[in-house]
Each structure stands twice: as C-alpha cells, then as structure tokens.
Amino acid sequence: MRTETTLIHPPRTADEPFQTLTVPLHHASTVTFETMAAFESRHERLYDGYSYGLYGTPTSRSLEQQIAALEGGTRALVTPSGLSAISLVCMAFAQKDDRILMPSSMYGPARTMAQRLLAPLGIDTVFYDPTIAGSVGDLLDDRTKLVWVESPGSVTFEIQDIPAISAAAHAHGILVAADNTWATPILFNPLAHGVDLSMQSLSKYASGHSDLNMGSIAVKEEALFRRLKDVARFLGLGVGADECFLCMRGLVTLPLRLRQSEQSSLQILEWLRDQDSVVQILHPAEPNHPGHAVWTRDFRGSSGVFSIVLAPHSADVIERAFQELRLFKIGASWGGAHSLVAPSNPRSGRDDLAWLSTGHLIRLSIGLENVADLIEDLQRFFGALGATATDKRRFHTNLGASSAE
C-alpha cells in the first residue's frame, strides 16, 4: 500500500488479550460491519448493540451499565447534560394536550424549559408545592402523564415524601421521575422508593471535577428504556467517549468525596449557627427544615450543598462581602472539588414560601478543601457583612411545619 493508504489503514494489532484497570476509549461516529446482512439489520442493534457512534459505543455502554447498577435499575441511558435528560423524559412520555407536574422547587432551567419548549408543543406543566406529599393526587387528572420530584429542591432544599407521591401517581397510572442530583444513588435510591425514572446530572457529584456536562436516566422496566432510547435517537442525543471516561473515573471516588463534603458541611453548619447575619439555614439535617423527618427516614446522609438566608443588607454590602472570598468561587453548579457560592432569588414565580425568612439567599457547595480554610474564608465574608440587621430572626425558631413531615 502507498503512503496515504497506509496512514488510513494501519496494520491490526495482535488479538492477544490486553487487560487494564480502566475502560478503553472508543471514539467513533461510523461503525463498520462484516457483512451486508449485518449492515442492513443494524437498527436492530439500537438497544443492545452498536449501529452508529451517536447511539452508543462500548465506552458509553460501560458507563450506562455502571449507572444502572448504582441506581438499582436494569437499564440506564446517558445524555449530553442533566437538562437534556429532563427534557428527554418529558418529551418521551408526554405529547400535545398532556400535562406534567413539577415541584415549584425544581431546578430552575427545567422550569424555563417547560415554559418555553414544552408549552409551545401543547404540553402543559403544573408547578406544585413540594411539601404536599400524597395530596399531589388531588392535582392529577386523565391528561396527566408524568409527575416530577426533586428532593431536596435545588435552592430551597425542601424534602419531598417521594414514596407517598409515587403511590398517589401510580394509583392514577401516572409515571414518576426524580431528579436525584443532590443525593446521588449513594445517599438515596429513587427506584427503591417508587420512582419509575431516576435522573441525575452527572456534571456534578458523579463526575466530581467540574470538567464535563452529562446526564443520566435509570429505569427498571425495559419498555421505559426503549422509549427513552427511541426519542433520544430522534433528537440526535449522544455522548462522546472522553466524557464517559471522565465520568467513570469520577464515579470511582464518589462515595469518598460525598463523605468528605458531608463532614465538612456539617462542621460549617455548626459554625454558621453562631453568625449574627444568618437568619435561616436551609439544610435537611436542620430539625425545623421542611421535610426533615422524611429525610431522616429515607436518606442515608447529606451532600455538601445547602443554602442560607442572610439578614437584609444593601446590595453594595453584599457585593463587598462576596469580593472578600478567596476560596469560594461564584458559580452556579456544584459537586466538584472546589467550593462554590451563588446568590439566588427563589421567591420569583413562587407563592409557597411563607416559611422562608426574609433576606438574601445564597447557596453554598462545599468542596474538598480543608474545612478550617473554608471557615476562614467565610469569616472574611461575614466580617464584611457585619451584624447590621435590626429585625434578625434566629433560624432555630419554629419556621412552620411542613405537611411533608
């Protein structure tokens, strides 16, 4: 063969077994076949074999199998992001004139997706109080095809009674999907608590290094997996081998990282209780937090993401306080090695937050830095704030019982 051809068709390596501790990376768009018959029947391999790189490679299949096992499911599908996984579930199981229920505490971009993508397609979304537990059944009708849960919520961290909500939905023949990104399957298994589709953003704790975007959906029923796979194919959703490899590398240390984040977070919570500018802590381990009893019953621990409400300050004071931070970076995600802080306004578009104290809400993601260094960083933040609020309400007072408890 001449030079150009040799470069395109290199000699094959020996078939001698080669074993390593990592999953090989398979970069592929085109998949080749030994015979015409195999090529013509390639679409039959969509669910379990290989027909085109977009629909799966040995690398992505390995990750999906690992996630299915971690979730306690039989099948799993990976997608390009957590939001794409949420959108895929909605579009796979609802169509024109159907209804979907989402908790008002759900991940903000998912709410926006429902309003700007699903609504023009004729799919209605009802946002419900996350603390109503089994009473969600009162909101269901013949048009409702899917109920979402997210426990805890992304900013206000209400814990939902997922078994009660699942039972109410299933009594009407309705599917339940869970966004389990905060807990991951290490701390909570939605499929073992009545949920039909367990979704998580692998971009966060699963990957653990803030360097990739990916989502996953795990199920127990083959029919649900095949429906998801079909719609994912129609939407052209696929994940590259490099991202899958990085995620699998992150999963190896997931339990250790979660344990460290929890330990550091609980120490920081203890310190925050003595800060004059903190009027409320939004963390499921707090006894007065909405759903605390349900969290104690169903979860195996907590991750490192929670919010605090600060006493009212001027915008200039808040800005100066943020500028004092050295280790906490301002960012909207969570679950990586670096600690993050993000301001938020959860009251926008919600009327079910009477229990939430007045003040500035900020969300913290506790990373893997030494906890003493993180507390010193927060001391700079609170030092800049000062104890300026005159109407301070301590977070340990009764903030209103949740009907989810």
Image (cartoon, rainbow, N blue to C red):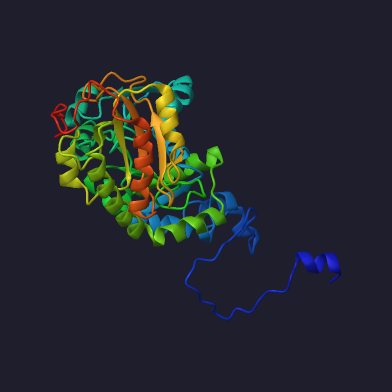
Residue 243 sits above or below residue 16 on the image = above
Residue depicted at 27% across the width and 53% down the height: 263
Residue 400 sits above or below residue 78 on the image = above
**Residue 399 location (% of width, % of height):** 16, 27
Among all residues in the image, which is located at the extreme right?
Answer: 2
Between 223 and 280, which is closer to the camera in this rendering? 280
Between 317 and 270, which is closer to the camera in this rendering? 317
Q: Can you say which quadrant of the picture contains the C terminus?
A: top left
Between 343 and 124, which is closer to the camera in this rendering? 343
**Residue 75 location (% of width, % of height):** 38, 53
Residue 5 sits above or below residue 336 on the image = below
Q: Can I make out residue 73 in this image?
A: no
**Residue 295 location (% of width, % of height):** 19, 42
Q: Can I make out residue 295 in this image?
A: yes
Residue 14 sits above or below residue 321 on the image = below
Residue depicted at 51% across the width and 44% down the height: 80
**Residue 216 location (% of width, % of height):** 42, 47
Among all residues in the image, which is located at the extreme bottom?
Answer: 16
Q: Can you say which quadrant of the picture contains the N terminus?
A: bottom right
Q: Dividing the picture into quarters, in which one does residue 2 lie? A: bottom right
Horizontal relation, residue 247 to residue 150: left or right: right
